[in-house]
Image (spheres, rainbow, N blue to C red):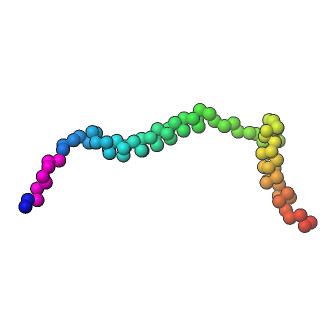
């Protein structure tokens, strides 16, 4: 009985093995997606609302400003047992 393998292994280059491309594809897809996301975020920047002067640009902004003012007001958060 011989310990030698019965078949010779194939000398296939690494780039011809499908498992190599499956391993490379995962990180490559993540890198492309993150670059795409960063590009979208840089190209379509959200505007910053200037609420320090109490300026409201429209009715749509009013609930957010009321909530911010309510949270920032210490008297509004105090218990009502006065």
Q: Residue at x 90, y 67 (%)?
A: 81
Which stretch is magenta?
A: 3-9
Q: Measuring 21% from the left and 41% from the top, which residue is drawn there? A: 12
The count of marks equals: 0
* Residue 42 located left or right of residue 57: left
Q: Position of residue 71 (x, y in %)?
A: 79, 54
> Left or right of 67: which side holds 38?
left
For this orientation, the residue located farthest to the left is 1
Pick out the residue farthest to the bottom: 81
Q: Is residue 51 above or below residue 76?
A: above
Q: Residue furthest top?
A: 43
Q: Position of residue 44 (x, y in %)?
A: 62, 33
The answer to whether residue 27 is left or right of residue 17 is right
Q: Residue furthest right?
A: 82
Residue shown at 79%/49% (left/top)?
67
Q: Is residue 63 magenta?
A: no
Q: Which of these two is toward me, 42 or 11? A: 11
Question: Observer-nearest residue: 54 or 4?
Answer: 4
Residue positioned 14% across, 48% down in the render: 8
Residue 80 visible in the snapshot: yes
On-image quarter of the C terminus: bottom right
Give how far across and how far down residue 43 sits, in percent: 59, 32
Q: Main secondary structure of the magenta part?
A: loop
Whole-percent x and y of residue 7? 14, 49
Screen quadrant of the N terminus: bottom left
Q: Would you say residue 52 is visible in this rendering?
A: no
């Amino acid at each position: 009985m011989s310990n030698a393998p019965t078949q010779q292994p194939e000398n296939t280059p690494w780039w011809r093995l499908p498992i190599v491309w499956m391993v490379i594809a995962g990180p490559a897809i993540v890198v492309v997606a993150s670059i795409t996301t960063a590009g979208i975020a840089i190209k379509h920047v959200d505007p910053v609302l200037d609420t320090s002067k109490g300026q409201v640009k429209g009715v749509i902004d009013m609930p957010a400003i009321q909530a911010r003012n309510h949270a920032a007001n210490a008297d509004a958060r105090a218990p009502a047992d006065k």
